């Protein structure tokens, strides 16, 4: 997706998701530019700016919006006046850091009647920076 700001002020886009306002989230996206632009990722009241070059680079913002009791959180990206960016694979995950990109057309969400199937998680190192784990989720309904 190409994001072009032909205006004279910072502009961007945001999506409001129906998620708890006090979880830790990671907003990530692949980005590049030919105009030397920078991009700012936003999450509720948190924001982080990144320089962008001509090569694809994955950037991310990890934060806890700190909005106890809130049931929605806004996630987005902004570009400075006159800037132009190409974006790919933007995703939000309820965790500290980005995982591999997952193409999806399905809706995510919070499943209040679900829980972990065990109090223990076993992580196995396969090689440098490659780990495996199996997590069982038990659901009492939708």
Image (tube, rainbow, N blue to C red):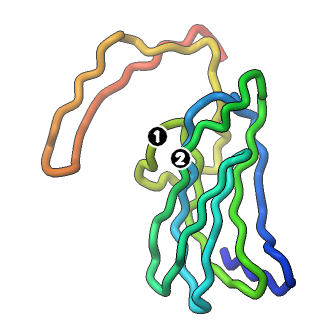
Q: Residue 16's image quarter?
A: top right
Q: Residues within 10 Å of mark 2 (few under 14, many from 20)?
A: many
Which residue corresponds to the image point at 62% horizontal and 83% vertical from the top-left? 37
Given residues 101 and 96, the one toward you in this image is 96
x, y (%) of residue 29?
Answer: 55, 62
x, y (%) of residue 139?
Answer: 54, 13
Give the labeled residue for mark 1. 96
Give the labeled residue for mark 2. 62
x, y (%) of residue 2?
Answer: 68, 79
Helix, strand, or loop for circle 1?
Answer: loop
Which residue corresponds to the image point at 72% horizontal and 46% vertical from the top-left? 45
| Position above or below: 76 against 130 | below
User: Mark 1 or mark 2, which is nearer the start of the sequence?
Assistant: 2
Given residues 114 and 55, the one toward you in this image is 55
Q: Indicate left or right for 117 with 130 as reference.
A: right
Q: Quadrant of the N terminus?
A: bottom right
Q: Which residue sits furthest bottom?
A: 35
Q: Residues within 10 Å of mark 1 (few under 14, many from 20)?
A: some
Which residue corresponds to the image point at 66% horizontal and 38% vertical from the top-left? 65
Given residues 141 and 58, the one toward you in this image is 58
x, y (%) of residue 9?
Answer: 84, 77
Which residue corresponds to the image point at 66% horizontal and 17% vertical from the top-left? 142
* Residue at mark 2 to residue at mark 1: CA–CA distance: 6 Å
Tell how many labels: 2
User: Mark 2 near mark 1, Cβ–Cβ under 8 Å?
Assistant: yes
Q: Indicate left or right for 83 with 117 as reference.
A: right
| Position above or below: 78 against 3 | above
Helix, strand, or loop for circle 2?
Answer: strand
Q: Residue 67's image quarter?
A: top right
Numbered label attached to residue 29: none
């Amino acid at each position: 997706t190409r994001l072009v700001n032909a205006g004279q002020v910072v502009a961007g886009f945001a999506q409001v998701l129906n998620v708890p306002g006090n979880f830790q989230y990671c907003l990530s996206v692949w980005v590049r530019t030919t105009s030397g632009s920078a991009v700012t990722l936003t999450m509720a009241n948190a924001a982080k700016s990144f320089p962008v070059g001509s090569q694809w680079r994955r950037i991310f913002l990890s934060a806890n919006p700190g909005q106890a009791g809130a049931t929605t959180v806004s996630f987005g990206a902004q570009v400075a006046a006159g800037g132009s960016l190409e974006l790919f694979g933007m995703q939000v995950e309820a965790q500290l850091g980005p995982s591999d990109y997952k193409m999806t057309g399905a809706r995510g969400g919070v499943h209040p009647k679900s829980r972990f199937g065990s109090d223990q998680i076993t992580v196995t190192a396969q090689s440098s920076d490659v780990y495996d784990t199996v997590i069982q989720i038990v659901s009492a309904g939708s």
